[in-house]
Amino acid sequence: MPAMDFWCELASTYTYLTASRIDALAVRANIEVRWRPFSLGPIFAAAGWQTSPFNVYAEKGRYMWRDVEREAERIGLPFRKPSEFPRNSVPASKVAMLGVVRGWGPRFIQRTMRAEFAEDRDIGRTEVLDEILGELNLDGPAVRDEATSAEHNGALRRSTEEATRLGVFGAPTFMVGEEMFWGNDRLAHALEWAMRARRSSSAA
Amino acid sequence: MPAMDFWCELASTYTYLTASRIDALAVRANIEVRWRPFSLGPIFAAAGWQTSPFNVYAEKGRYMWRDVEREAERIGLPFRKPSEFPRNSVPASKVAMLGVVRGWGPRFIQRTMRAEFAEDRDIGRTEVLDEILGELNLDGPAVRDEATSAEHNGALRRSTEEATRLGVFGAPTFMVGEEMFWGNDRLAHALEWAMRARRSSSAA
């Protein structure tokens, strides 16, 4: 099955829109999706931003909140503007990296982003992560310990370094081979590209 | 007929994608489109950029060129990456402002953007503008004189000031009443919004 990398930042509003619907679309297209959590923080810092560009550029930020609200309504996704933005996504993203290895990564990411963007909960807090992990029948403290163990703790940083090498500059980003697609608006195009790549390779 | 403002910057790649297809879509939706040329230069300068953000942020720029190439192919629009970007769009935009008043604005903008983004011509040059105006059966020097006359010369600046007041931060931008939609990707959504506004007002 052809595959697509889904580079996801857990603090990103548009990643929330994608995370809620990518599985259904990918199953229909018969494309394997590899969830790739990473951190935009270091990438934004390299661009000279100490916070999200939606905070740096006020008009763009104001528009983004309205746009995300409208888009969530279009796809029937619950959305409430968080009281703080961006949340610190690093602890949740480290857990998500472990989850991707273990198989519960997508469910954890989807549930975490719903807490963040529909329930205004602070995903940077240990208690919130433990509650979410509990809902997935996982032992929160044990999972967090493992996610920050010598074996796993560097995974998020390595993932972010790989994203940087690929030229990822925002989220969500989809990679189909060398082909990059940026933004929730490009999800369908990226899947089409992967399907086309499959047809070409089976014709060859 | 409900109306939509199409804020267009003649140096903008994504405006090119929109300008080529907005008329056909608007006719089908029965929505009046008001073409509103403006300059992004002063808006970018206020954000701290002395050139296009696609030049300031290299990864974003590299992605944009590939994305525009792909999107142009999707809609069957000729595209060639210009040898210089962005072009100086001010002289052409002043002519476009006059054209909007006279009725040939959209045709002039479409032809100018094709010269810029499919033929790699410098739309900042008088000779290029005169050729394009000639193709539209207009007298280039006379049109340019009028566009920069005391009566018309300030129109582009006033348009840019209005865009700034509205919070426009990029192009293309669509306004349906107070509702803002940014980007070529939002054209269909903006038209849907205008159609919905019509249904609501006829139901009232």
Image (cartoon, coloured by chain):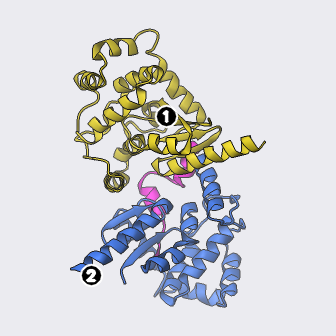
Chain colours: A blue, B yellow
- Residue A58 inside the magenta-drawn segment: yes
Amino acid, disc 1: Ala
Can you name the residue that lies furthest to the top here?
A: B150
Q: Chain of mark 2?
A: A
**Label 1 residue SS:** helix
Q: Position of residue A67 (x, y in %)?
A: 60, 52
Q: Report the quarter where the C terminus of chain B lies.
A: top right
| Direction from residue B52 to residue A71 in the image, left or right | right
Query: What residue is disc 1 on?
Result: B46
Seen at 67% across and 73% down, the residue is A125
Residue drawn where x is 31% and y is 18% of the image = B138
Q: Is residue A106 above or below residue B126?
A: below
- Neighbours of disc 1 within 10 Å: few (<14), some (14-19), many (20+): few
Residue B58 in the image: state x and y as whole percent: 33, 52
Q: Residue at x 27, y 81 (%)?
A: A202
Whether B107 is drawn above or below A173: the answer is above
Q: Is residue A135 left or right of residue B37?
A: right
Q: Nearer the viewer, residue A166 or B113?
A: B113
Q: Give the labeled residue for mark 2.
A: A202
Give the quadrant of residue A2: bottom left
Residue B69 in picture, x, y percent from top left:
31, 53
- In the image shown, does B125 or A189 lie closer to the viewer? A189
The reply to whether residue B148 is visible in this rendering is no
Q: Chain of mark 1?
A: B
Distance between the alpha carbons at the discs numbered 2 and 1: 52 Å
Contact check, label 2 and label 1, Cβ < 8 Å: no
Q: Is residue A36 magenta?
A: yes
Q: Which residues are magenta?
A: A35-60
Q: Is residue A111 visible?
A: yes
